Each structure stands twice: as C-alpha cells, then as structure tokens.
Image (cartoon, helix red, strand yellow):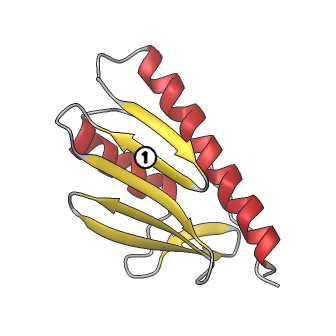
Amino acid sequence: MHESAFIAAADATLERIGLALDAALETSDADIDWNLTDGVLTIECEDGSKIIVNRHVPNREVWVAAKSGGFHFRADHGHWRDTRGHDDLATALTRLLKAQARLALRLPELPAPQER
C-alpha cells in the first residue's frame, strides 16, 4: 500500500472515532476531552489517564496505547485487525473506553484499505 493511501485511510479512521466520541459525549456525563493533531488522537479521561490512537506510517498500522497496554492494528481484508488478538479496532476501542473512561460508545465501522 502506498504511503499516501495509508495516511488517508488512517486519518479517516481517526476522524470517525472523533465524531463518535462527540456523539457519545452529548448524552453522557463522562468528562472526557479529545484532540486530533497530525495523525495522533489523544483521549484524556476524567482520571487524567489517556488513550492514544495514532497512525504508524512505517509499519502501515494504527497503534493504540491505553492503561491496559499497547495494541497494533493492521489492514486485513478491509478491517483494522489487532496483530496479536485479532479484534477489530472498533471492538477494542469500545472495550478500552468503557474500562478506562467509563464511556459507553458505539463506534461505526472503521474500514481499512484493502491490501494490494
């Protein structure tokens, strides 16, 4: 996959996550702030902890760092799949946000580019 195609797909994924966070926060009492800058989505939780989702261009992966650990997601047949656990990115983030931020979030499908 070309670098520019990966960056476009990863950035679209990060933007979808941000939109889903905004929608969830409209009906939640959770005190969460988020920011998206240069391919890095930082979610600051009420307790001061953070969940960071970023694109990692050299490996063509989306990386997630949370209290529970670090996770790498690679494009696999149109989905971002964890390279170790095989969860998709939306499922993993939903679980992480519920555990760490106490935020019930329904993420839309987060499609990854098809490998060529």
47 relative to 89, above or below: above
The answer to whether residue 17 is left or right of residue 83 is right
Residue 34 percent coordinates (x, y):
44, 36
Q: How many marks?
A: 1
Pinpoint residue 102: horizontal percent, then vertical percent: 24, 34
Q: Is residue 8 left or right of residue 45?
A: right
The disc labelled 1 sits on which kind of residue?
Answer: Thr
Picture residue at 62% right of the left edge, 49% below the top? 109
In front of the other: 65 or 106: 65
> Residue 86: image x %, image y %?
44, 75
Residue 103: image quadrant is: top left
Residue 108 in view here:
no
Q: Residue at x 81, y 69 (%)?
A: 5
Given residues 31 and 103, the one toward you in this image is 31
Mark 1, other Cα within 10 Å: few <14 / some 14–19 / many ≥20: some
Image quadrant assignment for residue 29: top left
Q: Nearer the viewer, residue 12 or 27?
A: 12
Q: Which residue in the rendered view is the most extreme toward the left?
A: 47
Q: Relative to 57, does residue 80 appear above or below in the rendering?
A: above
Seen at 28% across and 41% down, the residue is 98
- Residue 102 in view: yes
Rendered-image quadrant of the N terminus = bottom right
Q: Which quadrant would the C terminus be assigned to in this image? A: bottom right
Residue identifier under label 1: 42
Coordinates of residue 37 in the picture (x, y in percent): 57, 47
Q: Secondary structure at mark 1?
A: strand
